[in-house]
Image (cartoon, rainbow, N blue to C red):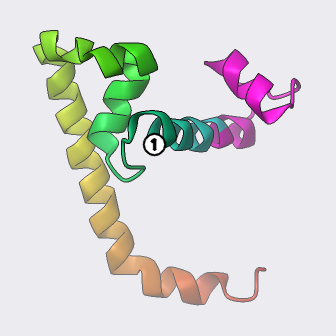
Amino acid sequence: MWGDYRKDTGNWSHDRDNFADAINFVGWYTDVTQRRLGVSKWDAQRQYLAYHEGWGGYSRGSFNKKPSLKKVALKVKRQADTYGAQLKRCSGALDKSVKGWF
């Protein structure tokens, strides 16, 4: 995947150990997964499964034979839901605190 990312972005100097590059990879992967497989960027459970199984494995439904993986993906969904709810509760305060940064 990292090679695909570097090739697709045209930047061969991306480094997995660099946080900015790593988080950019996550965004790239999520976007490509949505375009290729139709998995919403907001669907953490299915995005996780697509990352774990790869695009081909996900499209073949290989995760369906892995109940423990599906359990982990459900945990990912629940955690994402928790973070989303927390963000909604404090987004007003965040908006105020970053005003003027840009």
Q: Is residue 89 above or below residue 8?
A: below
Quarter of the rendering containing residue 38: top left
Q: Is residue 88 magenta?
A: no
Report the side of 98 relative to 42 (left or right). right
Extreme left residue here? 67
Q: Which residues are magenta?
A: 1-24
Q: Is residue 26 left or right of residue 34?
A: right
| Residue 42 screen position, x and y as percent | 37, 53
Q: Is residue 10 above or below residue 43?
A: above
Q: Which is more toward the observer, 39 or 69?
A: 39
- Residue designated by label 1: 34
Q: Nearer the viewer, residue 69 or 36?
A: 36
User: x and y percent of residue 56 in the render?
Assistant: 41, 15
**Callout 1 amino acid:** Gln
Residue positioned 58% across, 44% down in the render: 27
In this rendering, the answer to whether 92 lies above or below 22 is below
Q: Quadrant of the N terminus?
A: top right
